[in-house]
Amino acid sequence: MPIQILMPALSPTMTEGTLAKWLKAEGSAVEPGDVLAEIETDKATMEVEAIEEGTMGRHLVAEGTENVAVNTPIALLLTDSEDVSALDQSPSPVPDVALASATPTQAPAEPRGALPTPALDTDEERFFAATQIQTVREALRDAMAEEMRKDELVYVMGEEVGEYQGAYKITQGLLQEFGDKRVIDTPITEHGFVGLAVGAAFGSLKPIIEFMTFNFSMQAIDQIINSAAKTLYMSGGQMGCPIVFRGPNGAASRVAAQHSQDYTSWYAHCPGLKVVAPWSAADAKGLLKSAIRDPNPVIFLENEVLYGQSFEVPTDSDFTVPIGRAKVVRPGADVTVTAFSIMVGKALEAAEMLAGEGIDAEVIDLRSIRPLDVDAIVRSVEKTNRIVSVEEGWPTCGVGSEIAALMMERAFDHLDAPVARIAGEDVPMPYAANLEQLALPQPESIVAAAKSVCYRE
Amino acid sequence: MAKPATRAASRRPIARKGAKAKRGMNRPSPTREELINFYRDMLLIRRFEEKAGQMYGMGLIGGFCHLYIGQEAVVVGMQAAINEASTVVTSYRDHGHMLACGMESRGVMAELTGRVGGYSKGKGGSMHMFSREKNFFGGHGIVAAQVPIGTGLAFGHKYKGEDAVCLTYLGDGAANQGQVYESFNMASLWKLPCIYVIENNKYAMGTAVSRGTAGTSLAERGAAYGIVGEEIDGMDVVAVKAAGEKAVAYASSGKGPYILEMKTYRYRGHSMSDPAKYRTKDEVNRMRQEHDPIDNVKARLAEAGVSDDELKAIDRDIRATVTEAADFAQSSPEPDPSELYTDILIEA
């Protein structure tokens, strides 16, 4: 029985890729270690190596095919004893690709492809008259490039942002357009380069600092809080610090406790900072442009899993999203669900499931966590009288804790049920796929919480 | 076969003792006017700090208060070596630096008393004061945090093509923080016009350099990054200025950062609540009597023929300035309660 060769995953978050090139023609002999094919994603190119010996029987996916899902059979390998006639037998299910070991166990949380334009309740709406489909990755890059074209004082600095084109390819092409004076590869030295950038911002430059992940921002936390956030106050208003700290935050997939933390509530705790965490590509672009123009330090929390997801994005380069304004991404009457970043997608999935059970959920994408658009939440709760807060981070002193307290203060008389919180489990992120799944909020748990505040079982 | 470099041989190009370097050269000879300015600037710091110490004792100044008495020659000499576009940043022992940068005594003193007339409107205190106008960028309370910040100011000078350097001051204690070396690495890599002035007053709080620092030449701390370092007599303002000019010329020419280790001494405690158990009174007295930076300039002034009367007139002026500052610091009102919620963010 021929061996199936499956489309491998190059990274923990890869869900699909392009089969760029076959390097073993049909009929050619294959030794273990031979390169069979090249595959590409928007992040990287990689070779697929054989681990079994045999003969390349049949290419199931042609060269140049895009959007090949991980684990799709791409070829059949004949073992020594087999001839071509074996290709038409049912193949062995054993994958022949060593690289495929890190196959994601989770289906992508959000629907692929473009999402419908959500209902808008702000003046952002007019920009959606002309849109294009972009990934979050492209939108972030465009935001930086547009602002760098406008303002010579804006520059990008971080590990691998230049020649490598960004560890997650967010800065792709920026070095080529703006040169190494403005796209600066740093040594691996977070405490040092963050302090340096804060000093540059005090000296009126406008740095965009990329953290390879916000987990590494802990190396630099003193400079972010004590220097960037507090100095304006301590100087009686003299020392503005126009700086953006951006990068992926929260869990990606299977990278365990030291690379999976959600820092939203940590940063949101601190006066002197603004904190945003967009979900859609349009918001990623509009908020990043606002963050770069903002005269204050802004923590811009991205999500690795969202980078490759596509949305409609306004084409007008004047499009921005104001910091501090939430957005109703799904109107509803029965229960309010607040979420931000990747959890917006999970909340929308949950809302669809609830709709099937006759519960009409309103989903609010908070977008900004500090300042938080409390008015928007209160307006919704006045209508629905019920609220579920969803976040990926830990529950203790989390964003949901804050929302619960705010609802006590601002919407107590409108609540028909106690505020429900959905959060990541109160544990360091486990590596094992099943445990990781258990540690992260899932649509099912949001559904259960929504039903509970609606007193439905 | 490559010869293993001896310690002495490898050290020579990196650290040159100030005294040794001077041997072959003419001793720098400051003008009369320059000496008078040194005297005035150092005496202002001395009298200001003495007054601050008194006012602390009277409960008019709160929190932490780190006096600069004894170290005056370092900032006064360095300030004389830079141009107007250059920037200065330091730690929390910062009163002297601010006065040397030309910030007003009354504004500094009123900040110490937490009044609205202070440089930070009373919201920063002794350790956190700034003046963009005078290119003084703080006043930072976390040991060594100012080192990457100063490196970033130098980065900005280079980015904007300015003819300026950043003087980044740090103490011997700060020289053991990791971010100093992260900064050295980037400053040297990118040839930033940053001069690291290490004020080695021999004690990191109460820990003598020899008890806290392996390898006690701080001038050599940049050697691994190819940064030139020199050890200077920080009690001699003339030597400080000469070293400063050399470092400024080097850094401004695009060659990158420079380290000056200033051998200096603080007469007072680390802060006002210092137990004074870690060094002897004799040691302090010997430094005051034999190495005082102000006495040093006074002697030069006498050699230059400046009369006692002229110096006394300067003393009187300075006492008047400091008295006026102290009065202002007590009469300026406390910040309005509404100031509690201002200056947290700039309105976008």
Image: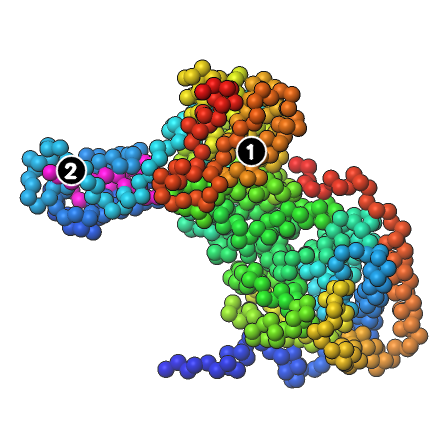
Magenta stretch bounds:
A1-25
Comparing A431 with A298, the one in front is A431
- Res. B87 visible in picture: no
Q: State the image coordinates of residue A272 (x, y, percent, origin top left).
A: 65, 43
Work out which residue is located at the far top of the displayed protein and give it. Answer: A358
Residue type at tag 1: Gly
What label does residue A92 carry, if any? 2
Q: Chain of mark 1?
A: A
Tell me where residue B205 sits by quadrant: bottom right
Q: Is residue B98 above or below residue A201?
A: below
Question: Which residue in the rendered view is the most extreme toward the bottom?
Answer: B24
Quarter containing the N terminus of chain B: bottom left
Residue type beneath disc 2:
Ser
Q: Please report the residue visible at 74 percent of the width from the left and 40 percent of the height from the top.
A: B342
Q: Is residue B12 above or below residue A202?
A: below
Location of residue B304 in the rendering, given as x and y in whole percent from the top left corner: 84, 80
Q: Name the residue located 55 percent from the left edge and 55 percent from the top edge.
A: A191
Report, in whole angstroms, how far the alpha carbon at label 1 lies from the one at label 2.
48 Å
Its colouring scheme is: rainbow
Report whether A284 appears left or right of B327.
Answer: left
For residue A20: magenta?
Answer: yes
**Which mark identifies residue A107?**
none
Q: Which residue is mark 1?
A: A400
The answer to which quarter of the image holds residue A354 is: top left
Check if mark 1's residue and mark 2's residue have beta carbons within 8 Å.
no
Identify the residue at image location x=78%, y=51%.
Answer: B119
SS for tag 2? Answer: loop
- Does residue A164 appear in this view? yes
Query: Is the residue at mark 1 from the same chain as the one at mark 2?
Result: yes
Depth check: give the residue in front, A279 or A429: A429
